[in-house]
Image (cartoon, helix red, strand yellow):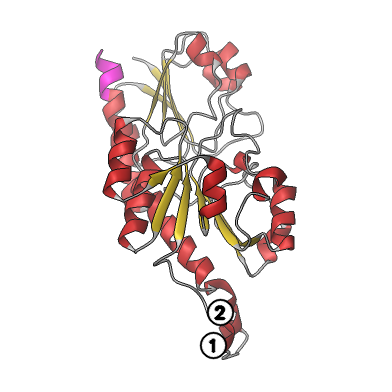
Amino acid sequence: MLRIGVFGLIDPCVVESLGGHHVVRQERPTPSGLQPLVGDLDGIVIRSPFRLDDACALAATRLQWIIRAGAGIDNISPLFREKGVRVRTTPISAGSVAELVIGLAIGLLRGIRPAHDSLRQGLWKKELFIGGELRGRTLGILGYGRIGRQVSRLMHGLGARIVAFDRTPDAPDKRRAAEDTDARLMSMEALFAEADIVVACLPGTPQTLHLLNEERFAQFRRGAFLINVGRGSLIEYPALVAALDSGRLAGVALDAYEVEPPGHLAIFDRDNVLCTPHLGAQTGEAQKAVGSGVVAHLHELLNC
């Protein structure tokens, strides 16, 4: 019998698949973190609100594997892999995240938030809310991985022109997706100069920390929109506020924050800002898919 930690809200099929093993369950983070728990664990299933930091890695003396229920491993210390711990991910919610991008883009272009607030105030001033269409606009995608490519497919279907930046643009899957959607892969600087809407889908790494800063925002087309469904650490917050104040950015949509939960940020009160609490994979379908992906990894790891 193994001792397996399951940390975070996850589909019931995961715990059900662990019959015969001792499961240590915690649904929400606590101030003490996971360090007091990991020393006695053989395996861990973890969701994004939890962090396995360096202290956890040093305390995990018997840990064999970690399954990250979702995409990205920026909440898992590199020390685990250095110690030989196997790390698996389940990046299978790209469709859910891409659909959220569509919703946020339409919300920004059509002024859904201020229009809704106007009606709540008992007003009927439709002439104030002349919006724009996705069709014919240029969409720039930062990060042409699974999510970026799915955004490309959906936006292409809506008539947007697609440009994209990726650090490995010659990968066969990225080339195929670009051909399928008439996307043009280009430098980041060229993308910023051309895109009407920039969608950030990049992971959180030391290389992408505050990538979108004052210097980068100055390269954007004036009046562009920014949507971030990557990691919150991509954006330098004061530079974002300055870009909105100057009109460099016409609007912003955020689904991720450098610190989560972020508390109340001043930009939440702006009419041209849409913010959601990291909802990218928060659909019933995506949660089922992630749970099934975790179970598949469990079958492999427990039977190897």
Quadrant for the C terminus in the image: top left
Dividing the picture into quadrants, the one containing residue 289 is top left
Label 1 crowd (10 A; few <14 / some 14-19 / many >=20): few
Question: Is residue 303 within the magenta segment?
Answer: yes
Q: Secondary structure at mark 2?
A: helix
Q: Secondary structure at mark 1?
A: helix
Question: In this picture, is 101 found above or below 216?
Answer: below
Q: Which residue is mark 1?
A: 126
Question: In this picture, is 161 found above or below 15?
Answer: below
- Residue 49 location (% of width, % of height): 54, 38
Q: Nearer the viewer, residue 278 or 58?
A: 278
Residue type pointed to by label 1: Lys
Question: Is residue 112 within the magenta segment?
Answer: no
Q: Nearer the viewer, residue 193 or 272?
A: 193
Label 1 vs 2, first from the N-terminus: 2
Q: Which residue is mark 2?
A: 115
- Kindly tell me whether residue 19 is visible in this rendering: no
Quadrant for the N terminus in the image: top left
Residue type pointed to by label 2: Ala
Q: Nearer the viewer, residue 101 or 248?
A: 248
- Residue 124 relative to residue 171: left or right: right
Q: Which residues are magenta?
A: 299-304
Question: In this picture, is 122 found above or below 147?
Answer: below
